[in-house]
Image (cartoon, rainbow, N blue to C red):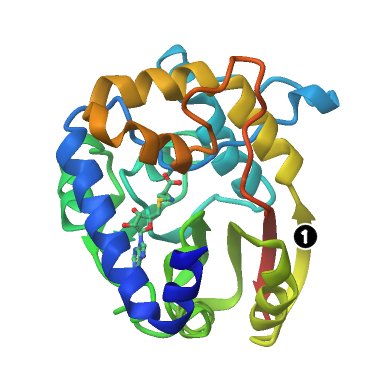
Amino acid sequence: MLNKILFQRFPNLKSWLTRLQYEYVSTLVKDKGAVFMNFGYTAHHQGAETLELHPDDEYHRYPLQLYHHVAKHVEWKNVEALEVSSGRGGGAHFIMRYFKPKSYIGVDFSERAIQFCREHHQLDGLHFQHGNAEDLKFADNTFDVVVNVEASLYYPNIEKFFKHVKRVLKPNGYFLYTDLRYAEKINEWHSQLKQIGWKVIKEEEITENVLKALEVDREQRIRLIKTYVPKILHRLFYEFIGLSPNAPAKDKPHLDNRRYWYFVLQKV
Ligand SMILES: C[S@@+](CC[C@H](N)C(=O)[O-])C[C@H]1O[C@@H](n2cnc3c(N)ncnc32)[C@H](O)[C@@H]1O
């Protein structure tokens, strides 16, 4: 509660703490055990077919499925793509291998995450560079697709980000976007997004799918925390992944009254 009030009053404090937090994650995890940092997605319980994955990707199934769900609606052939807030690069690496765009640039403001991606995700056409979502250093009309997954909640000025996305997209280019917000902020968030002027190709609330993914991935996430995070910080990291540290296995994860949405938008 206190942090919600503080962050509303001092939005740059949130951004600064976020940077610190993600730099720290890359200090803790030096290997490829955690190349994704999102809550994940599944529609299996709703009868969806199981996504076929390479055996090496099985370990990351749920966070990877969030990328798949966002990316599957557009044509990727010959596409020049940008991902803003690519984190530790698991999503960028997955999209390059499964959807095969011509090129893909991942941008993040964590220097250590970018360093990690350059060392661990080497594919032709895949590049990573340091940058800020609210000040994208690319020319107008550069990309066919812009991807953004579970990151814009950290940006102090979301409208700046949306304007940059529209600016750097080519005409008819796509913005593939997913994130979560507190229930009372959803309407404001949606109108900030729509105000920019897009053709809405798809929009869908996926909170239940994300919660289900957290539930089925629970044990693996707990193992990850136990492997990489010092014990004194366990409680904090359990909160990050929507779990109460001492809850029995049957306890359901929660998103603290936040709702998760995804959008496919086209620049018109
Ligand atoms: C929850 S992680 C998600 C990372 C990745 N999209 C994924 O799903 O694995 C959020 C990411 O946003 C990045 N980030 C936060 N604020 C940013 C900003 N203003 N500009 C660029 N990246 C930012 C963080 O460094 C972090 O890597």
Determine which quarter of the picture holds residue 185.
bottom right
Q: Is residue 156 left or right of residue 231?
A: right
Closer-to-camera residue (262/81):
262
Which amino acid does the dot numbered 1 rest on?
Lys
Marks counted in the figure total 1
Tell which of 153 and 93 is nearer to you. Answer: 153
Residue sitting at x 49%, y 22%? 246
Whether residue 219 is situated above or below residue 254 in the rendered picture = above
Q: Is residue 64 above or below residue 216?
A: below
Quadrant containing ligand 1 reads: bottom left
In the image, taking residue 172 as reference, residue 241 lies left or right, namely left
Q: Nearer the viewer, residue 242 or 52?
A: 242
Task: Name above or below for residue 207 compared with residue 6.
Answer: above
Q: Secondary structure at mark 1?
A: strand
Q: Quadrant of residue 53?
A: top right
Q: Position of residue 174 (x, y in %)?
A: 61, 66
**Residue at left offset 33%, top offset 44%:** 89
Q: Which residue is mark 1?
A: 202
The 10 Å Cα crowd at callout 1, few under 14, some 14 to 19, many 20 or more, is few
Does the rendering let one see residue 199?
yes
Question: Which residue shows up at 23% across the image and 61% down it?
Answer: 129
Q: On the picture, is 261 further left or further right than 35?
A: right
The residue located at (64%, 86%) in the rendering is 196
